[in-house]
Image (tube, rainbow, N blue to C red):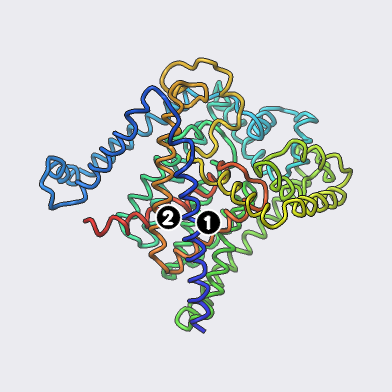
């Protein structure tokens, strides 16, 4: 029976290795690494200097100036970390204050409807089409109420600073996740700093949308799962499962793909039933997850009842987009949003008619592709989904195109028309490459926790291949998974050099 578990574990690890390597190749050839600016000639020189410095700091036997600087930094690591964090927070606040502006698309619909006393018919139609954003609307509405009560002059700045706080909360939780998993201080530290530079210092701080708002929820889910696996004290036996159920509910309402984490947990749990040593642990864990399921289901039921009877929005259920619509959109162009597909779907009078139309187009497109054509399409779509280390910055949200000649420090760096924008794309791509190399390093581990995280990432990547994708922005919601795994991977990679 143990052979069954080992076989499927090997299959998951092998698929993860192939997929992670493909993603790494795509990131290596991404145009972000060759975008030209006035400072282009210095980029790789700086990278080489950093690599040499990192190597010297790791090698205790190399008696260089850097080596003698290493020990004082280690002796005062708390002070050093405190200074770096302080500078990081100052950078974040400056970024928000300099870049905050009305963003477009779905984030605009959320912000505008939250600020209105009576939501317009146009915006009500938006929620009829995308009812999955109702929870996010209520959250933004609550923030608007608080902002008015506190007499905050700018609702946009309020949302952006809330976004900043939520991102920073996720960064801290990622560190705690690795500590709770007992993967070591080095892995926890690497995870923390990858989280800081991977999302904490990016311009996504000024886009208040579910991509970033869900980050602390995903990190919290991971922390609850790690706690549940610990000894059966009061917290791990009752509080963590209850909190897990609540967090999964919030994650599901913000991003339904959050359930992929729990599906991965279920699959790994089922595989453990084939392991005689692990089987006896499954029953108490099953009781905890049953409690989480009860809390999740009960909260979901209460929310649906509240929406039905208390919501200020009048929704037309026949306007809702079914999942088949997003599969259909994911089969054309770059695999992302398609305005023609949207209009054609909305032209159908009912949800049932919309599903039938979507399925007809899906079959038609698959026939037109053929096996080889569909395989090439999936390859290109996967590149669009995963290769861009900026997570599609500048491709959505027309506000950043309103300044033809940005000035100052932040706008030239982050605006697409800015003279230094290529520098941001370059460094963001390098950080993404560091994360992806860390993922490859995590393949050295075959324990249940690592396999579960790898499986969750695979699940999201496959989801994005089948449904609407086409841009790497959709990876933001799962970044805690990437950072935690990459942190452990880099701890393994760097250990022999110590």
Q: Is mark 1 on a helix, strand or loop?
A: helix
Q: Count residues near mark 1 (Cα–Cα under 10 Å), then give few for <14, some for 14-19, many for 20+.
A: many
Q: Is residue 444 left or right of residue 209?
A: left
Q: Where is residue 61 in the image (x, y as percent from the top left)?
A: 12, 53
**Residue that mark 1 sits on:** 457
47 up-or-down from 459: above or below:
above
Toward the viewer: 87 or 143? 87
Q: Where is residue 52 in the image (x, y as percent from the top left)?
A: 23, 43
Q: Count residues near mark 2 (Cα–Cα under 10 Å), then give few for <14, some for 14-19, many for 20+.
A: many
350 up-or-down from 225: above or below:
above
Q: What element carries label 2?
A: helix
Say which residue appears at 42% left-offset and 17% top-offset: 408
Toward the viewer: 55 or 249? 55
Location of residue 301 by image quarter: bottom right
**Residue that mark 2 sits on:** 439
Q: Which of marks 2 and 1 is nearer the N terminus?
A: 2
Q: Distance between the residues labelled 2 and 1?
A: 10 Å
Q: Where is residue 238 in the image (x, y as percent from the top left)?
A: 51, 65
Say which residue appears at 57% left-offset and 26% top-offset: 156
268 up-or-down from 322: above or below:
below
Residue closest to the far right: 349
Residue closest to the far front: 372
Residue closest to the far left: 63
Q: Are marks 2 and 1 in contact (CB under 8 Å)?
A: yes
Q: Position of residue 107 (x, y in %)?
A: 63, 33
């Amino acid at each position: 029976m143990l052979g069954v578990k080992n076989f499927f574990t090997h299959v998951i690890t092998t698929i993860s290795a192939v997929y992670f390597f493909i993603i790494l190749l795509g990131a290596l050839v991404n145009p972000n690494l060759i975008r030209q600016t006035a400072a282009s000639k210095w980029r790789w020189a700086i990278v080489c200097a950093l690599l040499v410095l990192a190597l010297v700091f790791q090698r205790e036997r190399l008696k260089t100036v850097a080596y003698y600087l290493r020990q004082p930094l280690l002796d005062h690591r708390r002070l050093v970390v405190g200074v770096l964090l302080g500078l990081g927070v100052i950078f974040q606040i400056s970024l928000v204050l300099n870049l905050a502006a009305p963003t477009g698309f779905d984030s605009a619909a959320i912000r505008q409807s939250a600020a209105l006393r009576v939501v317009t018919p146009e915006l009500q139609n938006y929620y009829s089409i995308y009812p999955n954003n109702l929870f996010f609307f209520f959250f933004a509405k609550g923030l608007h109420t608080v902002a008015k009560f506190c007499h905050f002059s700018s609702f946009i700045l309020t949302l952006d600073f809330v976004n900043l706080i939520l991102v920073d909360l996720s960064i801290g939780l990622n560190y705690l996740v690795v500590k709770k998993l007992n993967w070591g201080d080095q892995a926890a530290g690497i995870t923390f700093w990858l989280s800081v530079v991977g999302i904490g210092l990016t311009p996504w701080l000024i886009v208040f949308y579910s991509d970033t708002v869900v980050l602390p929820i995903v990190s919290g889910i991971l922390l609850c799962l790690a706690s549940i696996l610990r000894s059966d004290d009061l917290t791990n036996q009752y509080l963590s499962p209850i909190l897990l159920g609540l967090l999964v509910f919030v994650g599901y309402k913000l991003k339904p793909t959050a359930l992929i984490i729990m599906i991965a947990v279920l699959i790994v749990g089922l595989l453990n039933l084939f392991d005689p040593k692990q089987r006896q642990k499954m029953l108490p864990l099953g009781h905890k997850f049953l409690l989480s399921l009860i809390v999740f289901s009960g909260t979901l039921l209460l929310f649906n009842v509240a929406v039905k009877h208390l919501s200020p929005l009048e929704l037309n259920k026949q306007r809702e987009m079914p999942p088949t619509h997003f599969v259909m959109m994911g089969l054309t162009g770059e695999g992302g949003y398609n305005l023609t597909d949207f209009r054609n779907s909305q032209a159908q009078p009912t949800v049932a008619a919309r599903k039938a139309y979507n399925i007809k187009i899906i079959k038609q497109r698959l026939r037109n592709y053929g096996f080889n054509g569909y395989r090439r399409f999936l390859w290109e779509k996967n590149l669009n989904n995963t290769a861009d280390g900026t997570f599609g910055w500048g491709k959505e949200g027309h506000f950043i195109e309103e300044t033809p000649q940005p000035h100052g420090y932040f706008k030239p760096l982050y605006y697409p028309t800015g003279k230094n924008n290529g520098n941001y794309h370059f460094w963001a791509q390098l950080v993404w490459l560091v994360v992806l190399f860390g993922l490859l390093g995590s393949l050295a581990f075959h324990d249940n926790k690592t396999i579960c995280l790898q499986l969750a990432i695979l699940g999201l990547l496959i989801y994005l291949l089948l449904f609407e994708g086409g841009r790497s922005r959709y990876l933001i919601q799962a970044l805690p998974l990437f950072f935690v795994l990459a942190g452990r991977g880099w701890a393994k990679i760097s250990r022999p050099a110590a």
